[in-house]
Image (tube, coloured by chain):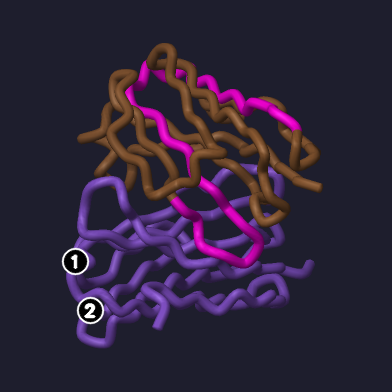
Amino acid sequence: ETGVTQTPRHLVMGMTNKKSLKCEQHLGHNAMYWYKQSAKKPLELMFVYNFKEQTENNSVPSRFSPECPNSSHLFLHLHTLQPEDSALYLCASSQDELAGSHPDSQYFGPGTRLTVL
Amino acid sequence: QKEVEQDPGPLSVPEGAIVSLNCTYSNSAFQYFMWYRQYSRKGPELLMYTYSSGNKEDGRFTAQVDKSSKYISLFIRDSQPSDSATYLCAMGVGGQNFVFGPGTRLSVLP
């Protein structure tokens, strides 16, 4: 298992539910990322946090709300999602955002498989 | 035209075969070219990356970049059942916004 853990591993929710995804990294990194991976579609970067500050938001709908209380933890709060939001949500971390720009420095977690009914 | 195109497969080969995985892209500014391997129920792990053009070899894996044709390849020699996974190409200019292909699912049959 990598140094990046994600919980839950699977989540089924209705469109009116509110849920949260959790990511924790044990690598001493300072930058964390959320990606969305839909079936047969490319991986999409959603959010970037560097030293707990959000530095990137790739035009993600407001029904996805990230939170980074410290450099080791990252949350993705979900509310009023749509069925097309069903996907694998991956968390990653790197030493810092500058280091993360080098391809060999991002470490991915196993992902949360989200199904929206 | 999509920024990065990759044949989704699935691709099935017998054990010991040479596997060729390919991606094409449209942005001539890309300088970093990566290949990730993603096993079922796991996150992607970086397999190889190259900067600019040329070849890079690591054990049974060889990555090639042809910037003039905007085409990258990953070759796997003496493929093993343990190589069965989805292979993602990714590329970027730098910074965070690497562009990923949709991935090719590979099955190596014993």
Chain identifier matching the purple colour in the rendered picture: B
**Percent x, y of residue B9:** 65, 77
User: Vertical placement of A57 versus A44: above or below?
Assistant: above
Above or below, A46 against A4 in this view is below
Measured from the top left, where is residue B52 in percent x and y?
19, 66
Q: Which mark is residue B82?
A: none
Which residue is rendered at x = 75% and y = 32% of the image?
Answer: A17
Q: Residue A25: within the magenta? A: yes
> Is residue A68 found left or right of B57 in the rendered image?
right
Quarter-wise, where is residue A29 in the image?
top left
Of residue A106 and residue A39, the one placed in the foreground of this image is A39
Which residue type does callout 2 highlight?
A: Lys
The residue under label 1 is: B52
Q: Quadrant of the N terminus of chain B?
A: bottom left
Q: Quadrant of residue A23?
A: top right
Q: Are the residues flagged by discs 1 and 2 from a single subunit?
A: yes
The residue sitting at the bottom extreme is: B69
- Distance from the alpha carbon under mark 1 to that under mark 2: 8 Å
* Residue B31: x %, y % from top left: 20, 63
At a point 29% along the width and 26% down the height, the residue shown is A50
Looking at the rendered image, the quarter that the C terminus of chain B falls into is bottom right
Q: Which residue carries the number 2 mark?
A: B67
The boundaries of the magenta stretch are A17-44
Q: Are marks 1 and 2 in contact (CB under 8 Å)?
A: yes
Closer to the N terminus: mark 1 or mark 2? 1
Judging from the image, what is the letter of the chain drawn in brown?
A
